[in-house]
């Protein structure tokens, strides 16, 4: 799993000019770009790398810098991304079964925002010799981030519990809350109890015996 930087499925879109000018001016300008990578800096919003038409490369811009339409309204980053990166170790997956499916998420104000699924960011802590100072391995705190292209042309990154996805042949109960789901607090581990022991031999097909 990559540390700090990872490839993403390339996104052809626009970057807002003010992000190229340190927010000083050019707020109404937009420039074509290809976004090709993501950086995961712990305690910072996921950040993205892109290529411009003159060959310039730019590193670590928030997702609020980009839009898929030239007339997309500017949206505050806090309404696009709910959580910062949980660790420097990031994975990027475009789940085939979700690709380009319709989604909606509920923003901080409770408003439902519609769009389509692009990819999923996820985090972990792979090295036991490195202190996990965040929540990447905590079952009740960790979140993934689904990257969504909103209908208004902006992009958002939202966790599972803020999203709903529409799969026409399966999600036939949209709008119904099937069960009141609770956050999982369990660490699922099959070697954490004295349930069984292996035989004391070098047999390839060793036997298990119950330990009570």
Image (spheres, rainbow, N blue to C red):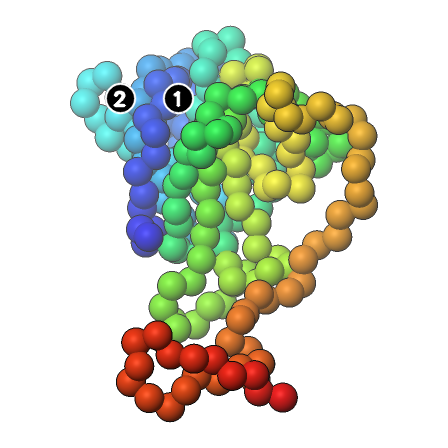
In the picture as drawn, the residue positioned furthest to the top comes out as: 71
Image position, residue 140 (x, y; %) = 64, 59
**Between 103 and 19, the one nearer to me in the picture:** 103
Image position, residue 97 (x, y; %) = 48, 29
Q: Is residue 131 visible?
A: yes
Q: Answer left or right for 89 relative to 212.
A: left
- Label 1: element kind: strand
**Mark 2 or 1 closer to N-term?**
1
Residue drawn at x 54%, y 22% as measured from the top left: 101
Q: Is residue 177 above or below residue 74?
A: below
Dot 2 and dot 1 residues touching (CB under 8 Å): yes
Q: What numbered label is drawn on residue 15?
A: 1
Q: Answer left or right for 209 relative to 180.
A: left
Number of numbered callouts drawn: 2
- Label 2: element kind: strand
Residue drawn at x 80%, y 35% as measured from the top left: 177
In space, the residues marked 2 and 1 are separated at their CA atoms by: 9 Å
The C terminus is located in which quarter?
bottom right
- Picture quadrant where residue 6 is located: top left
């Amino acid at each position: 799993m990559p540390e700090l930087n990872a490839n993403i499925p390339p996104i052809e879109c626009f970057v807002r000019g003010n992000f190229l000018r340190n927010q000083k001016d050019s707020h109404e300008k937009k420039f074509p770009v290809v976004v090709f990578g993501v950086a995961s800096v712990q305690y910072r919003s996921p950040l993205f790398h892109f290529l411009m038409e003159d060959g310039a490369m730019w590193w670590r811009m928030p997702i609020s810098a980009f839009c898929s339409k030239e007339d997309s309204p500017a949206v505050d980053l806090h309404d696009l991304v709910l959580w910062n990166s949980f660790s420097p170790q990031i994975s990027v997956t475009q789940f085939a079964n979700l690709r380009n499916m319709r989604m909606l998420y509920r923003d901080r104000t409770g408003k439902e925002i519609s769009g389509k699924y692009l990819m999923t960011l996820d985090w972990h802590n792979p090295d036991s010799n490195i202190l996990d100072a965040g929540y990447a391995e905590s079952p009740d705190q960790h979140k993934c981030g689904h990257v969504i292209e909103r209908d208004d042309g902006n992009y958002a990154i939202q966790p599972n519990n803020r999203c709903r996805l529409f799969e026409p042949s399966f999600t036939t109960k949209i709008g119904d809350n099937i069960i009141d789901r609770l956050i999982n607090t369990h660490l699922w581990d099959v070697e954490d109890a004295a349930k069984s022991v292996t035989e004391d031999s070098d047999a390839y097909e060793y036997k298990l015996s119950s330990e009570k």
